Each structure stands twice: as structure tokens, then as C-alpha cells.
């Protein structure tokens, strides 16, 4: 891998999805590769969503989820500022994106990412040098 890669919430959540072993394996491998080669990026939004989703929907113990947030936070972590919120609102308005997806795209762009790994957006769609990649599709 070359260039920065942004990992959306669903990628991190699938690392805990034992009921979906194929997706879990892909997610674990992707996070591990991004950590190993130093290209992985997340945002504070993604870390918050990961904690809430895994503890509420998957029943992950909050102590375990907290530790994983610490581990995922060792990737490059992008904070959300007011100008990011405004830019995400504009992406939402101009491209018909869900607001939270627009904020993820904005964070990935701000971090200089070339790819955004997610299953929540259109695969291979491009936004100013950023390509959406669904890692669960067979290529």
C-alpha cells in the first residue's frame, strides 16, 4: 500500500463481528496492514462511532472497546473542527451524501488520504483525489 488510507467506522466494527467471519478477517487484515505500513487514518468521529456501535449493537464489553479505541487511535487520528463540519454540510448538500458520510470524506481529504475504505458508500466513487473502496467486494 502507498498513500494514506482512511478506515471508516464499519471497518473497525467488523473487527469484532465474530458472526461474520469473512468480513471480520478482511477488516482485521486491512487494519493490520494499515498499522504495519503506517498508512492508516481514522477520525475522532470514527472512534466515537466504533465505541457506541460495538458496545450497543455487538455487546462488546466497554473495557474491551475502550482498549480497542486506544489501539485504533494509534493510527493517524484526525480531529473534527468547525471548518470540517461546514465543509461536510456543503458535501452533503452538493452531492446528496448522508451528513455523517460527508464528514468522513472531509476528514479523509483533510488527512491527505487517497483511499477511503467503507462499505457505506458507492465503491470507486471519487471526491477530489479520494477514492471510495469497499474492501468486501471481490475484485
Image (cartoon, rainbow, N blue to C red):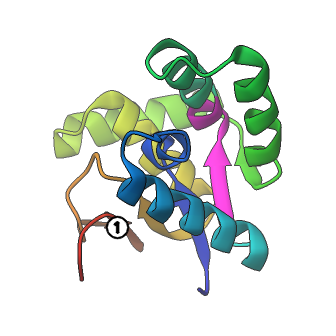
Residue named by callout 1:
133
Residue 109 visible to an observer of this rendering: no
Asked whether 45 falls inside the magenta stretch, the response is yes
Q: Position of residue 19 (x, y in %)?
A: 38, 39
Q: Secondary structure at mark 1?
A: strand
Quadrant (top left/top right/bottom left/bottom right) for the C terminus: bottom left
Asked whether 20 falls inside the magenta stretch, the response is no
Q: Position of residue 134 (x, y in %)?
A: 31, 63
- Mark 1 is surrounded, within 10 Å at the Cα level, by few (under 14), some (14 to 19) or many (20 or more) other residues, namely many
Q: Is residue 4 positioned above or below 89 on the image?
A: below
Q: Nearer the viewer, residue 66 or 129?
A: 66
Quadrant (top left/top right/bottom left/bottom right) for the N terminus: bottom right
Q: Position of residue 127 (x, y in %)?
A: 33, 63
Give the number of marks.
1
Q: Position of residue 38 (x, y in %)?
A: 76, 73
- The residue positioned 43% from the left and 60% from the top of the image is 117
Quarter holding residue 87: top left
- The residue positioned 37% from the left and 59% from the top of the image is 22
Tell me which segment is drawn in magenta: 40-47
**Left/right of residue 10 with respect to residue 32 in the rendered view:** left
- The residue positioned 73% from the left and 46% from the top of the image is 72
Residue 139 visible to an observer of this rendering: yes
- The residue positioned 47% from the left and 41% from the top of the image is 18
**Left/right of residue 82 with respect to residue 104 in the rendered view:** right
Q: Nearer the viewer, residue 89 or 122?
A: 122
Q: Nearer the viewer, residue 76 or 55?
A: 55
Q: Is residue 67 positioned above or below 121 on the image?
A: above
**Left/right of residue 82 with respect to residue 75 in the rendered view:** left
Amino acid at each position: 500500500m502507498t498513500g494514506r488510507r482512511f478506515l471508516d467506522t464499519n471497518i473497525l466494527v467488523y473487527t469484532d463481528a465474530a458472526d461474520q467471519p469473512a468480513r471480520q478477517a478482511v477488516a482485521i487484515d486491512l487494519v493490520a496492514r494499515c498499522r504495519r505500513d503506517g498508512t492508516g487514518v481514522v477520525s475522532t468521529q470514527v472512534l466515537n462511532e466504533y465505541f457506541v456501535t460495538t458496545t450497543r449493537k455487538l455487546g462488546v464489553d466497554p473495557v474491551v472497546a475502550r482498549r480497542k479505541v486506544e489501539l485504533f487511535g494509534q493510527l493517524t487520528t484526525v480531529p473534527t473542527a468547525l471548518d470540517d463540519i461546514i465543509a461536510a454540510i456543503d458535501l452533503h448538500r452538493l452531492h446528496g451524501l448522508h451528513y455523517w458520510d460527508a464528514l468522513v470524506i472531509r476528514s479523509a481529504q483533510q488527512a491527505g488520504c487517497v483511499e477511503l475504505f467503507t462499505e457505506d458508500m458507492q465503491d470507486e466513487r471519487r471526491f477530489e483525489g479520494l477514492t471510495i473502496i469497499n474492501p468486501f467486494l471481490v475484485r
